[in-house]
């Protein structure tokens, strides 16, 4: 498949996940169901977030590790139905702001509906591709992302774009699926495995190297949890100050 055909398959799958009462797609990391999983990962689903968690498809809890402060500008790559963006919005407060970017129109619509229902004014969702971010240069303090970059055909482009929009000294906290060894080709070629967050995953060493190549420093895995065929990793990195 071409990269555009891959993205169409990803959009098709996550349009389905955006629908009410549809099971999470992320097969590697969501086998216990989205609500349970968000709770397992340490999310507090009070204050209307339980409904948002119906379409949660993450594999970690990047906000919990990002150390967000009041007034910070946060960007969520592949924001889905908005759970991480909403938790981040509570941490940065009214003087801060959160932008979520997602390429699936149904997810952006769902996230906007959720934001309206929650009455949040410091969050916005933009339809766009994380390989070509609709975000200004050097405008973001913290980038978060939860189980998304594995789905991008050109991960190096995602990291270069993340570097571009981050301010000098800004930081990244990513949760994503990584591989501990090569996947069999038939697994890699299976579109359901790909949209389920495994087929497009790469080994953690390669992941970190691509972030270094994009210009990030202090790139490290802060936590790694093994699943059946891959692992969920929490990865932090910084944009140099000069
Ligand atoms: C596994 S879900 C995770 C969603 C959300 N981060 C969460 O934790 O619930 C992957 C999301 O990333 C989005 N996505 C995948 N590839 C993308 C890309 N290249 N650009 C923007 N969004 C993308 C999908 O539309 C989907 O909403």
Image (cartoon, rainbow, N blue to C red):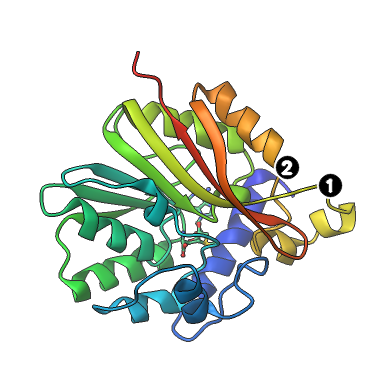
Q: Tell me which residue sits at (24%, 42%) in the image.
A: 73
Q: Tell me which residue sits at (41%, 57%) in the image.
A: 79
Q: Which of the two discs, 2 and 1, labels the residue nearer the N terminus?
A: 1
Residue 6 percent across, percent down from the top left = 66, 53
User: What element does badge 2 sit on?
Assistant: loop
* Displayed quadrant of residue 192: bottom right
Crowding at label 1, few (<14), some or many (≥20) Cα neighbours within 10 Å?
few
Total marks placed: 2
Crowding at label 2, few (<14), some or many (≥20) Cα neighbours within 10 Å?
some
Describe residue 21's horizontal placement relative to residue 88 as left or right: right
Q: Name the residue nearer the viewer: 199 or 87.
A: 87
How far apart are labels 2 and 1 at the CA level? 8 Å
Q: Looking at the figure, which quarter contains the C terminus? A: top left
Residue 177 percent across, percent down from the top left = 63, 53
The residue pinned by badge 2 equals 203
- Relative to residue 18, is residue 76 depicted above or below? above
- Relative to residue 227, is residue 163 depicted above or below? above
Q: Name the residue nearer the viewer: 116 or 178.
A: 178
Asked whether the viewer can see residue 169, the reply is yes
Residue 33 percent across, percent down from the top left = 56, 80
The residue pinned by badge 1 equals 182
């Amino acid at each position: 498949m071409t990269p555009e055909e891959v993205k169409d398959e990803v959009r098709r799958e996550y349009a389905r996940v955006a629908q009410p009462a549809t099971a999470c797609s992320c097969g590697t990391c969501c086998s216990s169901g989205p609500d349970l999983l968000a709770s397992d990962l340490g999310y507090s689903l009070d204050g209307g977030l339980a409904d948002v968690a119906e379409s949660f498809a993450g594999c970690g809890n990047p906000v919990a590790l990002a150390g967000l402060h009041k007034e910070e500008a946060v960007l969520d790559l592949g924001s889905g139905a908005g759970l991480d963006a909403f938790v981040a919005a509570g941490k940065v407060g009214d003087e801060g702001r959160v932008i979520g970017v997602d390429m699936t129109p149904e997810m952006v619509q769902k996230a906007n509906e959720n934001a309206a229902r929650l009455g949040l004014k410091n969050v916005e969702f933009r339809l766009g591709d994380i390989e070509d971010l609709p975000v200004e240069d050097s405008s973001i303090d913290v980038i978060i992302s939860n189980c998304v970059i594995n789905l991008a055909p050109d991960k190096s482009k995602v990291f270069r774009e993340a570097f571009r929009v981050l301010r000098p000294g800004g930081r990244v906290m990513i949760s994503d699926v990584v591989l501990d060894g090569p996947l069999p080709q038939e697994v890699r070629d299976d579109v359901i495995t790909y949209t389920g967050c495994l087929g497009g995953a790469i080994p953690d060493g390669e992941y970190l190297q691509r972030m270094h190549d994009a210009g990030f420093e202090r790139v490290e895995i802060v936590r790694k949890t093994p699943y059946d065929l891959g692992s969920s990793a929490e990865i932090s990195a910084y944009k140099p100050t000069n």
